[in-house]
Image (cartoon, grey):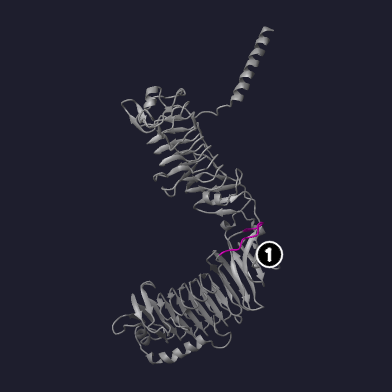
Amino acid sequence: MGETNCGLGKRVLVAALLVLFFTGFCVAVTSAADIYVPEGGIQTIQQAVNNARAGDTIIVRDGTYTENVHVNVDKLTIRSENGSANCIVKAAKQDLDVFFVSENDVTISGFTMQGSAAFGFAGVCLLDVSYCHISGNNVMSNGDGISILNSHSNLVANNMVANNNYDGIYLELSNGNTVANNTVANNNWEGIFLDSSSDNTFTNNSVSNNARYDFYSAEYSHNNTVEDLLLCDYPTTVSFTYDNGVGLKSVDTAPSKPSDKIDISKYVDATKVCADSWLFLNVSYDEADLGNVDEDSLRMWEHSGTDWVEVTGTTGVNTAENYVYAYITEFNIIAPLGDSNGLNCTFGDLCVNRTGWWRNNGTFNASTTQQIQLAINNASEGDTVYVYNGTYSENVLLNKRLTLQGEGRDVVNVTANSTCVHVFNVTASYVNISGFNVTGATGENSAGIYIRENIVRCNISNNTVSNNNRGIYLHSSNNNTLRRNMVSRNEDGIYLKSAGSNNISCNKVHGNTRAGFNLTGGSTGNNICYNNIIANGIYNGTDNSYQWQFYNDQQDNVNAMNNRWGMTNDGTINASIYDGSENHIKGNVTFMPRLNEEGPLAPIPGQLNSGAAPCEPIPELSTVILLGVGLLMLAGYLRIRRKS
């Protein structure tokens, strides 16, 4: 911060002494209007200045120049030939400015300025001057970046001012200057600092990660105007007037908002400099920031340190020009908050689309990645998360009891973001997943849908699961239901490891390259019926079998009755099943009786013959009995009517 609030500060006094130091370098010349560096006898920028006169232009060629330049010729332009990336001026002495300007109407542009690292010195310093232009420079690793001392009506524009030891842009006893379109970042004190400087205008500057404040004005600076200052942590553009000092900076972590309010992710941390400080603040927003906020309800709120309090008095929203405004006398974290406009989630508790997620009647949370996972993370136990059509690249962890419902497996595609991780990893019981096309988990032992150990009573239905290492993988999990899924083009279609008492029915398992079903590790007591198990494994032209439609890699016997196999010859079906017939230490698979085949029956090598559609729901026995009784009564009634 500045050392004094009135009179010449230390930096002004230090800069004044430089005039005496550099006096010996001044030589009047009558050279041409354009002076190139290096050229002929002029090898340094200082030599060019010493040989220049008012109105000349010094053009500095690419290279690195180690010197401290005193510009003591008025109406002089000094510019690089090809921009700041190619023309670097390093301070020969760190306790002198890289460029020290003591005459009016000087333009300096297109340099990287660095190395004046001592306190009170800068990349460029203006002392007692007016109408100078400092533009297009990269000012870094100095004491201050740009110092304006007792100087008026100057322009500082389009500079990158970063990583300086103290302030980025420093004004002391300086009035009527314009500071515009600069990026001021990562300076160790303030980004922009005003000490006893008034009537200055700051427009379209971006400030971020400055250690103390992004913008600070001491008490005796008046009538300064700030327009479109971008605070970068929560990108927030503010315009304001103030008096009696103010300090502003970005907010790293926003306080939790009131439960009945919605934010637009715009935050300002404001600090009083003295008891009489005031701030008239505008916070700008775009239509895209609103989400499901009722725009007319936006007002400025202050966080007291523990609670949010609405700013009273002069406050409101200008919906035509998209800003929220307030006159503020109590300073803290400030943010526009509003009411929900009631964004609906018609089919669930939370909804997801390709641009984000939202809770029913809640705020819209924009995101271009991990939309499903973010919704699950914010869901409560028992919620339904509804996913609208689109393609999502994610590996989704389902670690709480909920229903994950896609709009339809023909329109909702979930592809593994990492091929070595399950697409859906179910680590909680009572999870329902339906309505998805699940693909891309091609790493060894990775699955489209994986249900981990000790998880029970999950329902996986009406999904298409294809092009994974394992399609659906139940690992030591019991009493789950797999129903009406299309499982194809995986290495293993449905893989059970130590998984028992699961209901696996009405699925279409076809075209998987290693096995349609693969059971291992004591997977017993499963109800595997009414499935279409067709053309899985490698086609054997000798016996027209597929090896393997069903692979029983365990000592336990398995019941696989009442399935369709896409072929009518029982011997061919038996040859497509790996069990005790192929390896005497393995358990046998019972596939008879089997369902009759419908539609095209003969498997065609190299093509998928899906056979009949998966089954309709199988009625319970009580329903069958009631239906039979009803039919008998109807038949008796018709006989009586006919006889009458």
Q: Between residues 5 and 53, which one lies in front from this camera angle?
A: 5
Residue in view at x 57 percent, y 59 percent:
286
Quarter occupied by residue 49: bottom left
Name the residue type under label 1. Glu
Q: Between residues 201 and 13, which one lies in front from this camera angle?
A: 13
Question: Is any part of residue 483 visible from this angle?
Answer: no
Residue 12, given in percent of the width and then of the height, sits at: 50, 87
Examine the residues drawn in magenta and state their main secondary structure. loop
Q: Between residues 623 and 56, which one lies in front from this camera angle?
A: 623
Question: Is 495 left or right of 339, judged from the image as shown?
Answer: left
Residue 239, given in percent of the width and then of the height, sits at: 59, 69
Q: Residue furthest left?
A: 40
Quarter occupied by residue 538: top left
Residue in view at x 60 percent, y 61 percent:
322
Q: Which residues are magenta?
A: 253-262
Quarter of the picture holding the N terminus: bottom right
Q: Which residue is mark 1?
A: 310
